[in-house]
């Protein structure tokens, strides 16, 4: 580690000797709340040099001239122009929210995305997320991400992200820099992220910069709001199934602020009287909730500390009791995520952020049944817990280079499955099977260095290396992962981009292929027997912006090869108490390839996008499907999404979305075959699926609409939202089952979960 | 609109009713075209173990042999049938006797087994092969169905296991058996079973019987085809059949340590001081078929992963697979 820092110091010294120039650096904030702004374009008005603010609102731009006009632009805010003649540090550059009327006629000039080296990425506009129709009116950022090309959903209603053919476990989902292992509420219908508590979100699908590692398919970097430094404010909503409240404000004005946000459903309270009426003696319910808190303190213009904590839980319970029986069941899962970050500016060119992290995910279930004097109990539990530390440095040595380097260390503690089965008769224990699955402790460390370099006016390249080291007991794995992405400017508005990234993942998610949608997937580590997964992805794209970036169109093709994948062994079940390592198939290979088209209108009254993905997604395991290649469960040939938002007036906006996807692959029995039982050689008849995942659900499509009525009052603004989910009542399949008819024939039927679902919610901001 | 919004109770009631009506609709699936299915277990080596010095001719039969064919010669059984579309659940499989079966050793035709009904308990047409299959020889099985469809499968009969350096150690809780086997170059899997033989006497009836013993083999490649779910399935017939892969010792000699749990020994065993270990060397195709069969049978729960039978018949469905069996008799301490 010391060698790494010495090398970086030497590199910085060498790069600093480049020619004469001036440097402008500082922090950009929202003038109203002093919230640091992420992703603000900072660029020369005359010329093609520019940068964007990082996750802490910091920028540094070195230019090879003595005087320059610099423009700061950010969608929804008035652009700011300043002229600099010498090295300048701006402790706070405030940007004001645009007047809505003005924005409609004046399109702010922004740097073109065509100029960035990063490809296959998208920044989510939280304001737009809040306008898009939502299931039961519950705004969800992950559901919005599913409308992007290259991002697919799983089952009906599920918020799992399948990015360019990877599974949900292959997404590095970070909240304030800390991984979140399970992002689902209500069996996957909602995500755990409360949109009111989120400041920004960026999704990277490919061309991963070297600073990210540990997952194969995507990075979703979510930053919580810091809290208003200027004044106390709040935001809340009441919906059909949940309510939420967010409060933020200064603890010490312009020095310390807080943000606190909570959400809870009341499905249990609403349903309880009906359940009691229908089934006397029965209590059952379900609720979920989440809670975010963040405090940040500005020690000086150059030092700031952030502490954040995020907690979420889901709980399902059932109890039936009478004179002879007492049956109980519960299922619960949740995350605890915490981080403390210190950002420090060493100089106008060198920025540092260090973070201490903690994350824990746990699920558990208990089923107990007492029938007279016999008491049977089954308990299942699984958890993963990480402690980590990371450091990230950004250095802007000259006008051509933007260097990033850093380290990351995580100690993982896995308890993949804990199983207990107890039988008591007349209070005597008849059977007690306790399988405390082996605890696995592993260490994961990473070093990275990357540079964003301007080669010529047309060519800019981001290149880097990510080194990973992993230890579990006496087994070590390491890898050096090259990353490179570059753009060639065709003109000021269009470019061709190319990227390659190798990614390695040291943890696996053992997922059930039967699509039952329970939060029962087990996080397990790479071990002596199960090597880490690896993926290589190459992407080629073209991007063009029109009318000063109002419109953007991009086309990308990609190919991803994955190795050392794992799957549950055929016929096994996650509730089996046996060692999980004996229940998996290893050494699997996956191929995903396809193309994506994205057309977006970014500003004006009418905004939105159209996305289309054409892809093929296959897997191969020696011991599955006779060793033959088979389609991944979420292989979708075509995936289309349309998102439209229109501001009719300042007080009313409407939006509509439409999605279409090829039906997901599944297994249903197609025929009976006569087999020779290996024992005694007898004949028996067994139902067969044909090839694995050979049957397709009917195509999925759905349209949603919503309308928002805003009204500004003296001290607050209220919004009524009316949404209709599945507006034309398409009955999409949630699962398919076979049913024997009275005449002996077999019919297949599908269950459609969500018919047309209107909802209403009330939001207030003060 | 305003009036509607101001009547939230009406709206909520309407929404709850709407939301709770998940719907079930019929869907059509493509009709399966019935396919020819050709099956056969080819057993070589020892067909049964016979208790020595017994006046009662007590036998333990090979795990894989078709017991409906047990007689003086115990032939191998092959069959020809057709798959049935899932929608036609009430139909039974039809077994065909009008196909022609040819068995080749190398390029030489060595047998054309006729079809027959082997006994009244199992009146299905079958093809009974009387051939004495030789270990390490390769056989091709060709079946021509009545529509001239040609199905075929090829099997090399696994080498017979000849355990050597057999040693037995006893502790109060375990009988530990060590023995060495010489593994051929082909990929094999060894299926183990452990039997104890006991004498029973009840009223006017008495005689020998046998039970299966729990055991474990201390080798990293030892596993069970059937997941150990015995707390759900009392007396699961499959829980005493363990399998050892030769992945670590392919083509080499390998010492096996088999630990037999004494606490489960039945009382009768002590009268005979005998346990019998059944070792079946399975071809790779047999292993793949058997494993997938076990996974299919085991996959009874809605939480189980889908399992597909691994067949090896070309141009159709089915598995024609081979094993070679050895019985090892062990004298133990009381």
Image: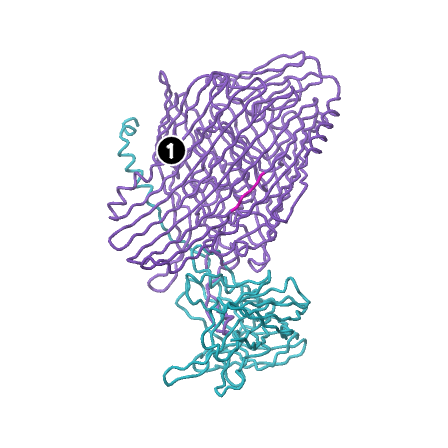
Residue where numbered disc 1 is placed: A723
Q: Is residue A745 above or below residue A288?
A: below
Neighbours of disc 1 within 10 Å: few (<14), some (14-19), many (20+): many
Q: Is residue B307 above or below residue A415?
A: below
Q: Is residue B56 above or below residue A14?
A: below
The quarter in which the N terminus of chain A is drawn is: top right
Visual colour scheme? by chain
Say what secondary structure mark 1 lies in. Answer: strand
The quarter in which the C terminus of chain A is drawn is: top left
User: Where is residue A755, by image quadrant?
Assistant: top left
Identify the subunit bearing mark 1.
Answer: A
Chain coloured purple in the rendered structure: A
> Secondary structure of the magenta portion, mostly?
strand
Residue A721, position in %: x, y?
37, 29
Extreme bottom residue here? B55
Residue A724, position in %: x, y?
37, 35
Residue A356, position in %: x, y?
55, 32
Q: Is residue B109 above or below residue A267?
A: below
Query: Closer to the camera, A398 or A551?
Result: A398
Instruction: Chain B: give its colour.
Output: cyan
Q: Which residues are magenta?
A: A410-414
Taking the magenta stretch, the answer to whether it contains residue B130 is: no
Residue B127, position in %: x, y?
53, 79
Q: Is residue B322 visible?
A: no
In the rendered picture of this protein, how many numbered marks are placed on residues? 1
User: Where is residue A716, by image quadrant?
Assistant: top left
């Amino acid at each position: 580690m010391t060698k790494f820092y010495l090398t970086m110091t030497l590199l910085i010294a060498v790069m600093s000797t480049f020619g004469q120039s001036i440097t402008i650096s500082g922090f950009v904030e929202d003038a109203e709340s002093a919230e640091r702004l992420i992703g603000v374009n900072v660029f020369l008005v005359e010329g093609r040099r520019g940068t964007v603010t990082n996750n802490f609102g910091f920028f540094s731009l070195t230019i090879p001239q003595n005087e320059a006009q610099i423009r700061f632009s950010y969608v929804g805010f008035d652009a700011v122009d300043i002229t600099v003649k010498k090295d300048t540090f701006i402790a706070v550059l405030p940007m004001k929210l645009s007047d809505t009327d003005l924005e409609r006629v004046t399109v702010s000039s922004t740097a073109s995305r065509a100029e960035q080296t990063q490809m296959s990425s998208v920044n989510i506009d939280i304001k737009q997320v809040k306008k898009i129709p939502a299931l039961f009116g519950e705004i969800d950022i992950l559901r919005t991400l599913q409308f992007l090309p290259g991002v697919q959903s799983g089952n009906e209603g599920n918020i799992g992200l399948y990015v360019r053919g990877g599974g949900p476990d292959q997404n590095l989902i970070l909240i304030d820099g800390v991984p979140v292992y399970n992002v689902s509420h209500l069996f996957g219908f909602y995500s755990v992220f409360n949109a009111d508590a989120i400041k920004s979100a960026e999704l990277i699908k490919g061309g991963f910069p070297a600073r990210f590692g540990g997952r194969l398919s995507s990075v979703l970097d979510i930053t919580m709001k810091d809290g208003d430094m200027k004044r106390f404010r709040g935001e809340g909503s009441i919906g059909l199934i949940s309510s939420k409240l967010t409060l933020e404000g200064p603890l010490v004005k312009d020095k310390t602020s807080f943000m606190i946000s909570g959400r809870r459903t009341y499905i249990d309270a609403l349903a309880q009287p009906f359940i009691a009426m229908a089934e006397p003696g029965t209590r059952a319910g379900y609720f979920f909730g989440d809670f975010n808190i963040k405090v940040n303190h500005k020690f000086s213009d150059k030092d700031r500390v952030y502490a954040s904590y995020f907690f979420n839980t889901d709980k399902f319970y059932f109890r039936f009791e009478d004179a002879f029986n007492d049956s109980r069941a519960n299922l619960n899962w949740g995350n605890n995520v915490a981080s403390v970050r210190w950002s420090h500016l060493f100089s106008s060119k060198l920025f540092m952020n260090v973070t201490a992290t903690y994350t824990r995910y746990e699920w558990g279930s208990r089923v107990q049944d007492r029938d007279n004097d016999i008491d049977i109990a089954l308990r299942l539990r699984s958890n993963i817990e990480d402690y980590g530390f990371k450091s990230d440095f950004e250095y802007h040595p000259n006008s051509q280079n933007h260097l990033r380097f850093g380290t990351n260390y995580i100690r993982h503690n896995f308890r993949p499955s804990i199983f207990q089965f107890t039988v008591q008769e007349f209070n005597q224990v008849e059977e007690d099977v306790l399988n405390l699955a082996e605890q696995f402790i592993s260490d994961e460390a990473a070093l990275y260095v990357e540079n964003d370099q301007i080669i010529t006016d047309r060519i800019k390249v981001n290149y880097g290396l990510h080194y990973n080291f992993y230890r579990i007991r006496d087994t070590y794995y390491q890898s050096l992962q090259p990353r490179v992405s570059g753009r060639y400017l065709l003109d000021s508005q269009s470019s061709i981009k190319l990227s390659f990234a190798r990614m390695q993942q040291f943890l696996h998610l053992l997922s059930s292929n039967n699509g039952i949608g329970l939060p029962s997937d087990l996080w397990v580590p790479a071990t002596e027997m199960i090597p880490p997964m690896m993926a290589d992805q190459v992407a080629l794209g073209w991007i063009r912006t029109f009318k000063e970036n109002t419109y953007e169109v991009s086309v990308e093709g990609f190919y991803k090869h994955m190795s050392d994948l794992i799957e549950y062994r055929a016929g096994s079940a996650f509730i089996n108490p046996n060692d999980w390592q004996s229940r998996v198939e290893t050494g699997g290979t996956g191929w995903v390839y396809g193309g994506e088209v994205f057309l977006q209108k970014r500003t004006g009254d009418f905004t939105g996008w159209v996305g289309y993905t054409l892809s093929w997604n296959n897997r191969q395991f020696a011991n599955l499907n006779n060793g033959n290649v088979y389609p991944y469960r979420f292989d979708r040939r075509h995936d289309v999404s349309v998102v439209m938002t229109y501001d009719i007036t300042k007080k009313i906006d409407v939006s509509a979305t439409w999605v279409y996807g090829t039906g997901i692959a599944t297994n249903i029995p197609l025929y009976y075959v006569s087999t020779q039982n290996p024992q005694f050689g007898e004949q028996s008849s067994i139902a067969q699926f044909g090839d694995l995942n050979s049957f397709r659900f009917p195509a999925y499509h759905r349209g949603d609409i919503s309308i928002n009525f805003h009204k500004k009052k003296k001290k607050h603004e209220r919004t009524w939202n009316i949404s209709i989910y599945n507006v034309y009542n398409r009955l999409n399949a949630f699962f398919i089952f076979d049913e024997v008819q009275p005449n002996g024939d077999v019919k297949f039927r599908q269950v459609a979960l969500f018919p047309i679902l209107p909802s209403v919610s009330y939001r207030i901001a003060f | 609109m305003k009036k509607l919004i101001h009547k939230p109770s009406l709206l909520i009631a309407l929404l709850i009713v709407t939301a709770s009506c998940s719907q079930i609709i019929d869907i059509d699936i493509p009709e399966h075209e019935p396919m020819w299915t050709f099956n056969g277990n080819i057993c070589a080596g020892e067909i049964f173990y016979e208790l020595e010095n017994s006046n009662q001719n007590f036998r333990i039969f090979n795990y894989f042999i078709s017991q409906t064919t047990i007689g003086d010669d115990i032939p191998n059984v092959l069959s020809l049938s057709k798959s049935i579309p899932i929608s036609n659940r009430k139909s039974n499989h039809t077994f065909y006797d009008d196909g022609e079966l040819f068995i080749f050793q190398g390029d030489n035709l060595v047998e054309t087994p006729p079809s027959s009904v082997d006994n009244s308990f199992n009146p299905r047409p079958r093809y009974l092969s009387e051939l004495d299959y030789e270990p390490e020889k390769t056989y091709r099985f060709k079946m021509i169905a009545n529509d001239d469809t040609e199905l075929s499968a090829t099997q090399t009969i696994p080498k017979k296991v000849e355990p050597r350096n057999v040693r037995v150690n006893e502790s109060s809780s375990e009988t530990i058996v060590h023995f060495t086997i010489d593994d051929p170059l082909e990929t094999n899997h060894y299926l183990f079973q452990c039997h104890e033989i006991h004498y029973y006497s009840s009223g006017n009836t008495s005689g020998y019987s046998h039970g299966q013993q729990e055991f474990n083999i201390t080798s990293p490649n030892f596993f069970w085809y059937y997941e150990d779910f015995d707390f759900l399935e009392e007396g699961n017939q499959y829980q005493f059949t363990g399998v050892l892969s030769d992945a670590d010792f392919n083509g080499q000699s390998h010492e096996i340590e088999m630990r037999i749990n004494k606490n489960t020994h039945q009382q009768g065993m002590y009268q005979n001081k005998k346990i019998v270990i059944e070792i079946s060397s399975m071809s790779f195709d047999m292993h793949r078929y058997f494993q997938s069969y076990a996974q299919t049978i085991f996959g009874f729960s809605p939480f189980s992963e889908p399992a597909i039978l691994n067949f090896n018949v070309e141009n159709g469905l089915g598995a024609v697979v081979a094993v070679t069996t050895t019985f090892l008799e062990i004298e133990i301490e009381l």
